[in-house]
Amino acid sequence: MPIPPDHPVPPTLRHLEQLMAHLLDGVIVIDPAGTILSANEAALRMHGVDRVADLGGTAEGYAERFSLRSADHRPLRHREYPLFRLLAGETFPDLIVEVAPAGEDQVRWVHQVRDVTMDVDGGEPDYLALVLSDVSMRFDAEARFNAMFQSNPAPAIIVRLRDQRIAQVNPGFLDLTGYAADQLVGKSVFALDPIAGVADPSIFHDAVEQGTVLPQSEAELRVADGSRRLIVFAGQPIDVTEEDGLLLTFADLEPRRQAQDALKASERHLTAVFEMAPVAMAISRADDRRITSVNAAFRDLTGHAEDLAVGRTATELKLWRSDAERDALDAVLATHGAVRDMAVTLCTADGEAVECVVSAETVRIADVTSTLWVIHDVSERRKTETELAEAIDQVMKDTSWLSRSILDKLAMVRRGKTHVPAVELSKREREILDLICDDLDDAAIADALAISRNTVRNHVASIYAKIGVNRRSGAVVWGRERGMGTDRG
């Protein structure tokens, strides 16, 4: 019986092939028995073949020619292949499979597969179809991103935008926080409360909810033990994962904060030591030489109050008695970066001159190059040394009542030596050395002592050996330092 003109014509396989030819997605059509009836160019290209027959002819033939893996790289058994699941009546709207020719380990293509069932009369399916999308490039990008994300030493997490839950964490973030991955993945980034102390919390919440760029900000990150670490973090929307997300990256600033806290504590301690030091100390900036700090000993020594000294230079305070001494200090400091025990005369606020020994060192204080000055008042010491020298000179004028060993030791003290070797001269040797110190020659000494010149020469040689000299002038110096000589004019 002829079909009425207005009756719809059932689609045929030819109609389907004509439609499939214009599709960008791949389509493989099979019948309910598992025979592959047709495939368009896109489907063939996604399997690296030129003819439909090269797909294997049947579902079993396809399984022999191609190896499939799941999205997590697990090899699939034949009954898990999309063709077999399609024949079993299962549905899979967005199934991801990795495809390679049989016998090859390297994945060639990644397909996103969905099922389509077609029937002509509303009864049992007449045709079954797999619709394939080639997502290889997307998965390559995701694989590269995941590899980079996991290997990146910088702590990072990925937050899903649709539900603001943590989707991935990298080892750097786990190391930073001490959490295990299962304590973070799937948790709301807000419920977990990983960030506190942000200057404007609404910016963080809006960026996470809307998937916008999050500018770099400092905050405190809660870690597994309940404490918080100072961090700097930023957020960037990403679309290289299955779902849109926000990549949050972190940098640990806690070591810097701890170092800064330690530095502040150290500076407080140094300030206390500086103020309590028994010697005069001052600090000046290296660039303009203006004094930034003085201690109590400096104020006591110079008579300059702190508020009058700070902010001024040593020249403005007229601290050094002469320009020559000031220039000499500056020259040594500029050349060597330090000064060691340089003798100068300091002038107090009242104009009093004070003999001092100055040392200086270039230092960094609060990131500013500065000079630390240490000033020792040696005026009393100089006075004591002068008085001691005068006393020794007075004693040396009359040594008849002192033993020779004491005179030797006093002479050595005058010369600044702490070790005084014992020198034992005979009575005759001391008589001869007395005359040597009076500038008498051997002949005069022989006449004075009524001995031969040869005897004088032998005693002189013995004296030289004992006192460690090898000429007459050395013996004179040695003897006169010990008060010898009678000035026989």
Image (cartoon, helix red, strand yellow):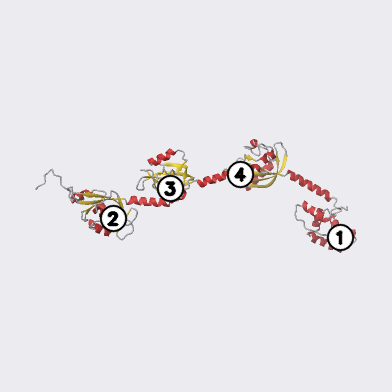
Tell me the number on the disc at residue 428.
Answer: 1
Label number found at residue 80 = 2
Kind of residue at disc 2 = Glu
| Mark 2 touches mark 3? (CB < 8 Å) | no
Relative depth, front residue between 50 and 456:
50
Nearer the observer: mark 1 or 4; the answer is 4
CA separation in Å, label 1 and label 4: 67 Å
**Given the image, on which type of amino acid does mark 3 rest?**
Ala
- C-alpha gap between disc 2 and disc 1: 125 Å
Q: In whole angstroms, how far apart are the C-alphas of marks 2 and 4? A: 72 Å
In which quadrant of the rendered view does residue 48 lie? bottom left
Q: CA distance from mark 4 to mark 3?
A: 39 Å
Label located before the other in sequence (1 or 4): 4
SS at circle 4: helix
The location of residue 308, given as percent across then percent down, is 65, 35
Residue that badge 3 annotates:
156
Q: Regarding mark 3 in the picture, which secondary structure is present there? A: strand
Q: Name the side, left or right, on which 282 lies relative to 69.
A: right
The residue positioned 56% from the left and 45% from the top of the image is 262
Give the residue pinned by disc 4.
269
Q: Are marks 2 and 1 in contact (CB under 8 Å)?
A: no
- Which is more N-terminal, label 4 or label 2? 2
Label 4 crowd (10 A; few <14 / some 14-19 / many >=20): few
Q: Position of residue 359 (x, y in %)?
A: 66, 46
Q: Nearer the viewer, mark 2 or mark 3?
A: 2
Q: Are marks 1 and 4 in contact (CB under 8 Å)?
A: no
